[in-house]
Amino acid sequence: MPTDSFSLIATAHAATGATGEHMDVLSLVTSSGLIVQSVLYMLVLSSVACWGIVFHKFRQVREARRQSAEFVRVFWETKNLTTIYEVVDELARSPVAQVFRAGYREVVRINKDRQDDASGVRVDSVERAMKRATTEQLTELERSLTFLATTASAAPFIGLFGTVWGIMNAFLGLSMTQSSSIQAVAPGIAEALIATAAGLAAAIPAVVAYNYFAREIRVLAAEMHNFASEFLSIVERHFLR
């Protein structure tokens, strides 16, 4: 029984110590200066915004890849372009499908104009329409990536600014006291280093997410360019002769 009592006391003491340590970190944040707190709030808001962008872009890119693969399968299995065009509305998040839509509409317009004037019919207008659609789709896919890149590059320096400012204030406060021990400046240095940790916590996920989405968008861009080349070959052989 005494052994069990000592064990319970030790466990309670360890739990109390862990809670006190956690509260010390929170108290350092709340007791820090205005500049350091502003830096921390800015980094927290940037981190929250980055995570929101990450979740949104992940769903967007995943749907774009899935629907593009489905559209390419339907395109090569179906011989009728009109039937394929009707499927495009069901695959609205596919960049490849939107490129096809632009090219198909241009082909229809050219064939309609050719009935009135058979001269001057070229595949250049179809190619321009598909390039324009590709650019629009890439612009949509790359939206918000600039914020990730900016956070990845700027957050460590913002955190470093908060750290430098906090350490500077800590040493200025030391000059006004009678003590010159490390205990006198330890709280100020600790709260300053929190800014650096917050900057890294915001920057590391941002740079990882940016590199991932940049690669996925390059893959989708290659798929759009490859499909546009193949569709132009089909148009030249069967429609614009």
Image: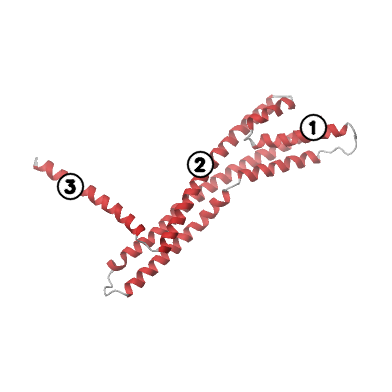
Structural crowding at the residue carrying mark 3, measured as other residues with C-alpha within 10 Å and reported as few (<14), some (14–19) or many (≥20): few
| Labelled disc at residue 10 | 3
- At label 1, which amino acid type do we have? Val
Residue picked out by circle 2? 55
| Residue 210 left/right relative to 199 | right
Structural crowding at the residue carrying mark 2, measured as other residues with C-alpha within 10 Å and reported as few (<14), some (14–19) or many (≥20): few
| Residue 79 left/right relative to 90 | right
Q: Are marks 1 and 2 in contact (CB under 8 Å)?
A: no
- At label 2, which amino acid type do we have? Phe
Pointer 1 or 2: first along the chain? 2
Give the image location of residue 110, x and y in percent: 83, 35
Against 19, residue 87 (above or below) is above
Label 1 vs label 2: CA separation?
39 Å
| Residue 154 left/right relative to 21 | right
- At label 3, which amino acid type do we have? Ala
| Residue 181 left/right relative to 161 | left
Residue found at x 47% / y 60%? 158
Label 3 vs label 2: CA separation?
43 Å
Pointer 3 or 2: first along the chain? 3
Residue picked out by circle 1? 108
Residue found at x 33% / y 75%? 175
The answer to whether residue 7 shows anywhere in this view is: yes
Label 3 vs label 1: CA separation?
81 Å
For the N terminus, the quadrant is: top left
Pointer 3 or 1: first along the chain? 3
At numbered mark 1, what does the secondary structure look like: helix, strand or loop? helix
